[in-house]
């Protein structure tokens, strides 16, 4: 991400709305922050929240040219990204969506910072929208520090480059290749003057992916750039543009942290201590359907649920109902639709999908609901 002394300056406070004595104007002010309306941000360090648990930030620091983003229900898109900076230096901004704490701005209800030794999983899912007429990288940032700090620059930054366009490269130098979370990466290591940076660059563009952040954290630990006594302070998904960038988008983002107690991230409201999944299939040569029932066996409701599981090799989702299932293969996440967002205590929700397969058909062997491991029926 370039010199991160700039990467996260303090976000400006929001101005209080001015109420007038006129009833009509007062009513208009009250109606303005609609629950699901898209929000445009052109302030250099402006931010807003989405889904009640993630922060979307504009974070323009490397240029005075205008940059505007529009926060959506599930992510954000760059609507204006003027200007350019030299490609042999730092990018001009890092618009992103995140879970955790970034320069004192913490996402609502986050469980971060959390000590690495207590984290049993940090599942995340991201879907990007790319353009070709810009110079940029699509970067997933993972921040680590010896202390549970919520401000300033962390000691180590892990960057996962899903895509890059143009003659740009990560901080430092290439130090080899590595297979992490089932994918091959070119690995870069260096220091930007403020913190260590460990980067993993995909050999070709990744549009969407679900993975466990801890797979990359363990890489940093094995390379001496972190320790299990350190803290995970935030995870962020966004873009570093050097030139232009309008049209780039994070279509969807989710993040859930599971600690040793077995509970999911309190950033996911009502995450239960336990859940149960029934996975029923109808299989024919080369294809199948799966009907999935998710039961909340906890004592609190689950709102905005995400069921994550890994499809066996050779399987691919072709369509789904009652949930959005993404990506189509590998580790996938089923996300509720608007009409079935809550699983009541003791209640259940169901969804299904159709898929194809090669070789011998098999079932997923592990499911997590908002980061909490489920039993199978």
Image (cartoon, rainbow, N blue to C red):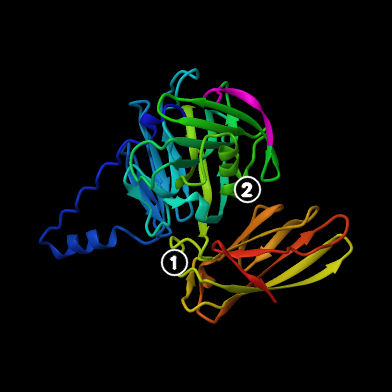
Looking at the picture, how far across and down is residue 310, in whole percent? 70, 57
Q: Is residue 29 magenta?
A: no
Label placed on residue 242: none
- Asked whether, in this view, residue 252 is left or right of residue 310, the answer is left
**Residue at the image position 71 percent from the left and 53 percent from the top:** 329
Q: Is residue 170 magenta?
A: yes
Label placed on residue 209: 2
- Asked whether, in this view, residue 276 is left or right of residue 312, the answer is left
The residue carrying pointer 2 sits among few (fewer than 14), some (14 to 19) or many (20 or more) residues within 10 Å by Cα, namely some
The residue carrying pointer 1 sits among few (fewer than 14), some (14 to 19) or many (20 or more) residues within 10 Å by Cα, namely some
Q: Earlier in the sequence, mark 1 or mark 2?
A: 2
| Real-space Cα separation, disc 1 to disc 2, in angstroms | 23 Å
Looking at the picture, how far across and down is residue 99, in whole percent? 44, 51
Looking at the picture, how far across and down is residue 194, in whole percent? 40, 28
Q: Nearer the viewer, residue 198 or 95?
A: 198
Q: Is residue 189 above or below residue 269?
A: above
- Which is more foreground, mark 1 or mark 2? 1
- Asked whether, in this view, residue 172 is left or right of residue 332, the answer is left
Looking at the picture, how far across and down is residue 362, in whole percent? 81, 63
Q: Secondary structure at mark 2?
A: strand
Q: Which residues are magenta?
A: 168-178
**Residue at the image position 51 percent from the left and 67 percent from the top:** 338
Q: Quadrant of residue 372?
A: bottom right
Q: Is residue 96 above or below residue 113?
A: above
Circle 1 residue:
269
Is residue 243 visible in this depiction of the protein?
no
């Amino acid at each position: 991400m370039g010199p991160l002394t700039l990467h996260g300056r303090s976000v400006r406070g929001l101005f209080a709305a001015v109420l007038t004595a006129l009833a009509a104007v007062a009513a208009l002010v009250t109606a303005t922050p609609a629950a699901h309306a898209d929000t445009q941000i052109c302030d250099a360090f402006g931010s807003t929240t989405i889904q009640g648990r993630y922060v979307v930030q504009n974070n323009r620091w490397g240029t005075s040219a205008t940059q505007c983003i529009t926060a959506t229900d599930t992510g954000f898109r760059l609507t204006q990204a003027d200007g350019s900076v030299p490609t042999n230096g730092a990018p001009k901004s890092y618009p992103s969506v995140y879970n955790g704490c970034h320069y004192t701005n913490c996402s609502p209800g986050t469980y971060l910072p959390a000590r690495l030794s207590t984290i049993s999983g940090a599942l995340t899912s991201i879907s990007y929208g790319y353009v070709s007429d810009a110079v940029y990288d699509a970067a997933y940032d993972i921040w680590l520090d010896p202390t549970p700090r919520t401000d300033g620059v962390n000691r180590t930054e892990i960057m996962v480059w899903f895509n890059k366009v143009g003659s740009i490269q990560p901080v430092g130098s290439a130090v080899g290749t590595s297979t992490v979370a089932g994918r091959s990466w070119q690995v870069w290591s260096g220091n930007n003057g403020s913190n260590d940076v460990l980067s993993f660059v995909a050999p070709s563009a990744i549009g969407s992916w679900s993975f466990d952040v801890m797979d990359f954290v363990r890489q940093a630990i094995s390379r001496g750039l972190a320790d299990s006594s350190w803290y995970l302070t935030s995870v962020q998904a966004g873009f570093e543009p050097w030139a232009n960038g309008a049209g780039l988008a994070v279509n969807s983002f989710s993040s859930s942290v599971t600690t040793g107690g077995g509970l999911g991230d309190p950033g996911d409201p009502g995450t239960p201590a336990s859940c149960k999944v029934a996975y029923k299939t109808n299989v024919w040569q080369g294809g199948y359907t799966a009907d999935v029932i998710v039961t909340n066996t906890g004592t609190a409701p689950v709102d905005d649920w995400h069921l994550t599981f890994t499809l066996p090799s050779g399987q691919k989702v072709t369509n789904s109902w009652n949930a959005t299932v993404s990506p189509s293969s590998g580790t996938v996440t089923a996300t509720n639709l608007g009409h079935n967002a809550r699983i009541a205590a003791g209640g259940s929700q169901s969804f299904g999908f159709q898929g194809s397969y090669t070789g011998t058909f098999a079932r997923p062997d592990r499911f997590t609901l908002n980061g909490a491991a489920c039993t199978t029926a």
